[in-house]
Amino acid sequence: MSGHSDGPITIHPVKDKNDLREFVELAYRLNRGDPAWVPPLKGEVYGLLTPGKNPWFEHGKAQYFLARRDGRTIGRISAHIDELALAQPVEQGMGPGTGNWGLLEAEDGAVAAALIGAAEDWLRGQGMTRALGPLSISIWDEPGLLVEGFDEPPTIMLGHNSALYQGWIEGAGYRPVKQLKNFAVEIVDGFPPLVNRIVAAGEKNERIRIRRVDKKKFDAEAALIMGILNDAWSGNWGFVPLTDSEIAYVGKKLKDIVFEDLIRVAELDGEPVAFMIVLPDINQLLIDMDGSLLPFNWAKLLWWLRKPQSKRLRVPLMGVVGKLQNSRMASTLAFMMIEYIRRDGVTKFGATQGDIGWVLDDNQGMNAVADAINATVNRVYQIYDKPL
């Protein structure tokens, strides 16, 4: 991180398109030297940050800030408030008075401190009494700061940041509130005998049906899955419900990278009660594209999406309806979905490794499932808070 000088650090709210472009571009400049950083597609980043494109803004508001020194942009941060998060019960991590910040990028610790201070001032001005972060921008996007697992690139939809940021954030008075874990598991040879026995027993149970999704009925399937998700996760720490327009938006974004062989819905007595979504790791392509699909990256991407071969597959989301949670049936359904997708992942996508996450550190059910399939933690994200 070169180019330091003695000029004062000044903080500027993002006011126009040029400011926003600097906000977006800075991440590419500061992280270019990190071999494990995967440059996101710039179109996706602008989509995340822009009211009218990202339906989060229907219930949230954000202010972005740039840090400059001697006319150069040397840092950025977002500060934001989500009305749906404010309406959540306090004991679940969000609740009244809790604002958020995220998307931090900074050349050095002094810049980070100035930016965090600016975000806190904005949140205080909005009547907030606690800052919880980093979140970019909602809990459903990229929550938490990477604190373990810096050496390899993340899979699709997982964040990555400099190892220096942890000290800078803790130095600004933040204390850890929650850890989110990501697991890696070797999948070629299948799972331990215990898991196979549970799957075999489930297959004999006539009440259970595990099915693939039907991409021809994509919108209905997406709504069905997200309905289960809102129910399954509603008791989780940090939960904020997804609105109908967010569900439609997520569906549209994922449509090109979801494959029928990699998604399962579990039905019990004919009622859909659980689901598992697995995505091929598009990051293996993005890592060399520098955020742009032009001029030829479109073609590469479209060609890959026709029949993706992906060494790593990521499980970003799975859920079982609340009434079945912590039951033996829930774990049977989970193991059946995991095993069926594992088989298709290995034979049809050339996968050798599964990536499961993130999982809350106190989610006993999911941690037990990870343990049973011999998964090991390969990345840890930390969420912090501080009274304002």
Image: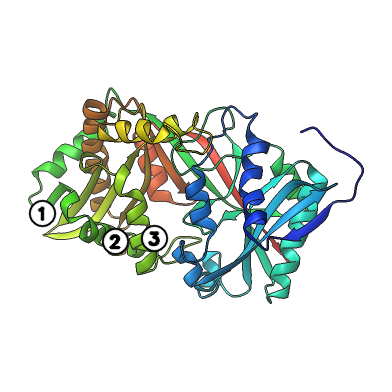
Tell me which numbered mark, 3 or 2, is placed earlier along the sequence.
2
Q: Which residue is mark 2?
A: 228
The kind of secondary structure element at disc 2 is helix
The kind of secondary structure element at disc 1 is loop
Q: Which residue is mark 1?
A: 207
Give the x, y percent position of residue 281.
39, 35
Tell me which numbered mark, 3 or 1, is placed earlier along the sequence.
1
Q: Name the amino acid type tagged 1.
A: Arg
Q: Within the image, what quadrant is residue 355 found in?
A: top left
Q: Name the amino acid type tagged 2.
A: Ile
The kind of secondary structure element at disc 3 is loop
Tell me which numbered mark, 2 or 1, is placed earlier along the sequence.
1
Q: Mark 3 near mark 2, Cβ–Cβ under 8 Å?
A: no
Classify 113 as above or below 337. Answer: below
Of labels 2 and 1, the one closer to you = 2
Mark 2 burial class by Cα count in 10 Å: few <14, some 14-19, many 20+ = many
Image point 43% across, 40% down: which residue? 156
**Closer to us: 346 or 237:** 346
